[in-house]
Amino acid sequence: MTARPDFFKHLATVGEELNVPIDRRTVVYRGTETFSTKNGRYLTADAYRGDPSTSL
């Protein structure tokens, strides 16, 4: 699965309304890479579950 910028569309809007800091905004997806963007971070499902073979 490819992470798309629109994954953060609603997260950014709701995050601002609820005063959630950008570093706390996370999209969990079934991809293979964990990375940060200006709107938050993308986290693989394995990393979210705490898979020790996945580094953050």
Image: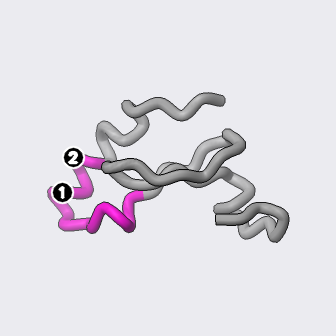
Compare residues 26 and 56 and report the one nearer the observer: 56
Name the kind of residue labelled 1 in the image. Answer: Glu
Provide the residue span drawn in magenta. 12-25
Compare residues 40 and 11 and report the one nearer the observer: 40
Q: Main secondary structure of the magenta part?
A: helix
SS for callout 1: helix
Q: Counting other residues with Cα less than 10 Å from the Cα at mark 1, is it few (<14), some (14-19), or many (20 or more)?
A: few
Q: Is residue 9 left or right of residue 30?
A: left
Q: Which residue is mark 2?
A: 13
Q: Residue at x 79, y 65 (%)?
A: 51
Residue 17 colored magenta? Answer: yes
Q: Which residue is mark 1?
A: 16
Q: Residue at x 69, y 61 (%)?
A: 47
Eyeballing the image, is 50 above or below 4?
Answer: below
Residue 48 colored magenta? Answer: no
Q: Residue at x 31, y 37 (%)?
A: 9
Q: Residue at x 65, y 46 (%)?
A: 33
